[in-house]
DNA sequence: CGCAACATTGAAGCAGATCAAGGCATGTGG
DNA sequence: CCACATGCCTTGATCTGCTTCAATGTTGCG
């Protein structure tokens, strides 16, 4: 937003598909927080690509439905959850995605900054930091360089589900 | 949510398409707030319907992209806007949709309850009520039975855009 | 009328924001 | 290799916008 307020919609991992803004008057951008390799596709090329494959439409539809479902979960998160629930949700969700791409390490790596996390959760950087520190005090996790290590994953999951 | 917290994702108007939950473990429902006529379609029938029409995929894709864009705007609203901005945004957005379906009356009808509006904006019913009352005190609008009448639409639009 | 559902209003409380200092790495030039 | 800057992150104190709690008002309907 003009005044600096920002909403982060998501964090992409290898293999993810990022759709761009379909309208002109819509400001939406992607920033790299790490080294990135991308495969870029113009809208026309994408449309053409779809037309070539008769079986694709259903998969596209399923994909879109999934995206929309995630978006709705995020709306619930932003609108109705506490800071504690937001941070726990984020950690659990992010860990799940890391596992899906094959990162099974105990430590959850957090390559994004606290500011990025805050803007993703609709919080301030201070609240994110304080919440993580509290989780650490309560022995739910340990904050390490570049990430956190979950000690009590079930408690975190319970917070996230709530 | 189990504890009664609720997130309203949107208000449908005549002609709108409502996609349902693609997954099982996902609770999402639609409530009628008024007399309703629906055309219901099973997922299989829908898939079949798409397959019959070679030109549909592109339109589906465009539709999904639009939905996703709206969802992202809503995330920005929920995560980063004040109560005042939320209510103003809602009024302006709702009016725009009413106009699109041909309702050009000066009074913006609000068939949904304050609770519904609150759950849509991530606020409490009291905050919605107070904000509307304040708007009325500030001569931005008049609260009437079943809706509001905008007196200073440009001011409302400015708040919504912010 | 009298009840029930919804809306408004007021007072008090609190979760999270804001303001303000430090810490703690990493880098850089002398 | 040290002085110093820079970019996060953490921590503390204070503030405030929204929530919560508690009445009260309003509307519609059997």
Image: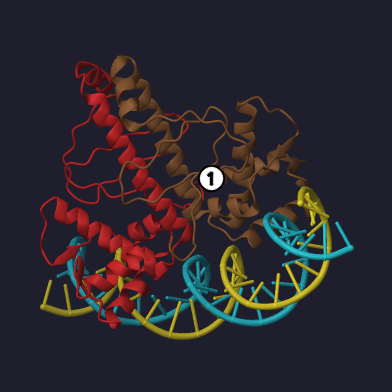
Chain colours: A red, B brown, C cyan, D yellow
**Is residue A10 rendered to the left or right of residue A41?**
right
Residue drawn at x 28%, y 38% is: A18
- Say which of C26 and B127 sits in front: B127
Q: Please provide percent x and percent y for residue A51.
A: 24, 17
Q: Please provide percent x and percent y for residue C18.
A: 52, 67
Q: Is residue B10 visible?
A: yes
Secondary structure of residue under mark 1: loop
Residue drawn at x 13%, y 50% is: A101
* Quadrant location, the N terminus of chain B: bottom left
Residue drawn at x 66%, y 62% is: B126
Residue A83: which quarter of the image? bottom left
Above or below — where is A122 with respect to A36?
below
**Is residue B106 rendered to the left or right of residue A113?**
right
Q: Is residue A111 visible?
A: no
Q: Please provide percent x and percent y for residue B42.
A: 36, 31
What residue sits right under mark 1 in the picture?
A: B31
Above or below — where is B140 with respect to C30?
above
Q: Please provide percent x and percent y for residue A154.
A: 24, 71
Q: Chain of mark 1?
A: B
Above or below — where is D2 with respect to A56?
below
């Amino acid at each position: 937003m003009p005044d600096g307020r920002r909403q982060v919609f998501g964090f992409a991992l290898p293999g993810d598909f990022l759709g761009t803004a379909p309208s002109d008057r819509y400001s939406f951008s992607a920033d790299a927080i790490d080294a990135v390799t991308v495969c870029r596709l113009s809208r026309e090329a994408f449309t053409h690509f779809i037309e070539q494959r008769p079986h694709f439409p259903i998969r596209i539809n399923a994909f879109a439905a999934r995206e929309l479902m995630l978006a709705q979960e995020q709306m619930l998160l932003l609108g109705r959850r506490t800071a504690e629930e937001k941070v726990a949700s984020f950690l659990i969700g992010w860990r799940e995605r890391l596992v899906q791409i094959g990162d099974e390490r105990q430590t959850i790596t957090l390559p994004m900054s606290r500011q990025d996390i805050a803007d993703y959760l609709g919080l301030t950087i201070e609240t994110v930091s304080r919440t993580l520190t509290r989780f650490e005090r309560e022995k739910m996790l340990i904050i390490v360089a570049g990430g956190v290590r979950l000690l009590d994953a079930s408690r975190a999951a319970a917070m996230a589900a709530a």
